[in-house]
Image: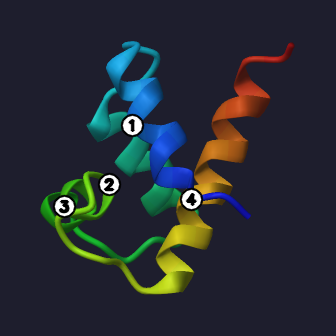
Amino acid sequence: MSDPRQTARALVELDIISVEGLWLRYWGNGGSADPFDFDAHLYEIQEPPPFELTVLAWAMEDLESDFPH
């Protein structure tokens, strides 16, 4: 699996979703990082535990289902 942080950052940069909106989806899927740590994980300032990347991938899948192709 590719690193979901790259896709997440691209979506934030394209104004498709905000960091706060992405964190809410991540948290709703069971993520445990607070918003500050989530931001640090997203921008690779801190390395998150592997499971947190899985949760971010789930949040990205949820976002994708909101915007069908």
Rounded to the nearest angstrom, the CA distance separating label 3 from label 1 is 12 Å
Separation of residues labelled 2 and 4 (CA atoms)? 10 Å
User: Regarding mark 3 in the picture, which secondary structure is present there?
Assistant: helix
Of mark 1 and mark 2, the one earlier in the sequence is 1
Taking the spot 72% from the left edge, 24% from the top edge, the residue there is 66
Badges 2 and 3: C-beta atoms under 8 Å apart?
Answer: yes
Q: Quadrant of the N terminus?
A: bottom right
Q: Amino acid at mark 4?
A: Asp
Residue 21: give x, y in percent of width and height. 37, 35
Q: Are marks 3 and 1 in contact (CB under 8 Å)?
A: no
Say above or below: 15 vs 42.
above
Q: Which mark is residue 42?
A: 2
The numbered disc on residue 3 is 4
Which three-letter amino acid code belongs to the residue tagged 2? Leu
- Asked if the residue under mark 2 is in contact with the one under mark 1, i.e. CB atoms within 8 Å, the reply is yes
User: Secondary structure beneath disc 2?
Assistant: helix
Q: Nearer the viewer, mark 3 or mark 4?
A: 4
Q: In the rendered view, does 56 fall on the left or right side of 64?
A: left
Residue at the image point whose x is 50% and y is 48% from the top: 25
Assess disc 1: are there few (<14), some (14-19) or many (≥20) residues with their C-alpha within 10 Å of its C-alpha: some
64 lies left or right of 54: right
Closer to the chain start, of discs 1 and 4, is 4
Q: In whole angstroms, how far apart are the C-alphas of marks 1 and 4?
A: 11 Å
**Picture disc at residue 9:** 1
Q: Secondary structure at mark 1?
A: helix
- Percent across and percent down for residue 62 are 69, 42
Say which label, 2 or 4, has the lower sequence index: 4
